[in-house]
Amino acid sequence: MINNQLIYVTDPLCLWCYGIAPDLDAFFDSLPDDLESITINGGLFPGAEAKLADKNFQNYLKNAAEQVTERTGQIFSESFWELLASDNFYYDTEPAARASVVVKELAGDNKMRSFIHKLQKAVFVDGHNPNLEDTLSELAHSCGVDKAEFLEKYRSDSSLEMTRGEYALAKTMNVRGFPALIYAGEGKGFQIAAGYATLKDLTQAFDYAREQCGQPILNDSAAVCGMNGCQ
């Protein structure tokens, strides 16, 4: 029986979540079998909170994108900036989040993360519109999900309810920014990441949490971790 959980709180259109994606994939690939992974959406700019991509908002994103590229090497192409500059474009993160929830329901948590990372490349590198059903259904199909089944679920009221339920859950965990990872084991909770973290950061924080729970660690890194983080 699995009692240990790693909860990943993200948003498909979070720039720093895109930045952490390669290290996050490597981290998840290294996790032990006794761990249940759960990915949920925190809600960046969903629905009524969507941002019109005017000059001010574009500049806000460009500043963040420059920092992401500098720290991680992940690129944002001219096609992405052209998408933002298109007439009356809103940076609404809810369609992408809702789509990821449907992929999770139909194909599981690992496929959900794969879908999110594919969507980030499609938007930030290829400049595809994440608000369009065609974009979302094509990406879901690339993750092994039947298009017709995806669209039926995506258009249902239940998919929106589940997505907003994830937003609410993230708030109850006091998650204020993305990406965030929380380890829960033996009745204890540990913050593995709050914002950008490298693979080394993630592994060290995870090992510290496991050590505190009396569980096997990934490597001998826990010794340099404390309650204030890892050195």
Image (spheres, grey):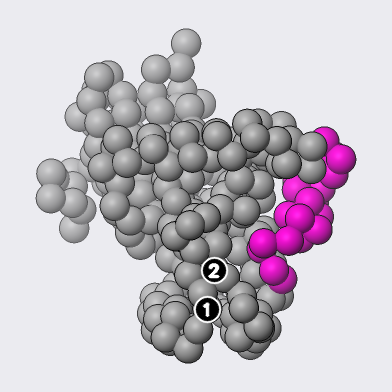
Name which residue type carries label 1: Ala
Q: Position of residue 128 (x, y in %)?
A: 71, 71
Question: Dot 1 lies on which element?
Answer: loop
Contact between labelled residues 2 and 1, with CB atoms less than 8 Å apart: yes
Relative side of 15 to 176, left or right: right
Give the residue at mark 2: 91
Q: Quick one: 61 or 230, which is closer to the camera?
A: 61
Relative side of 16 to 156, left or right: left
Numbered label attached to residue 174: none
Number of numbered discs: 2
Q: Quick one: 71 or 126, which is closer to the camera?
A: 126
Q: Which residues are magenta?
A: 128-149
Residue at 61 percent of width and 54 percent of height: 96
Name which residue type carries label 2: Tyr
Residue at 29 percent of width and 37 percent of height: 173
Residue 192 visible in the shown view? no
Cα separation between marks 1 and 2: 6 Å
Q: Earlier in the sequence, mark 1 or mark 2?
A: 1
Give the residue at mark 1: 53
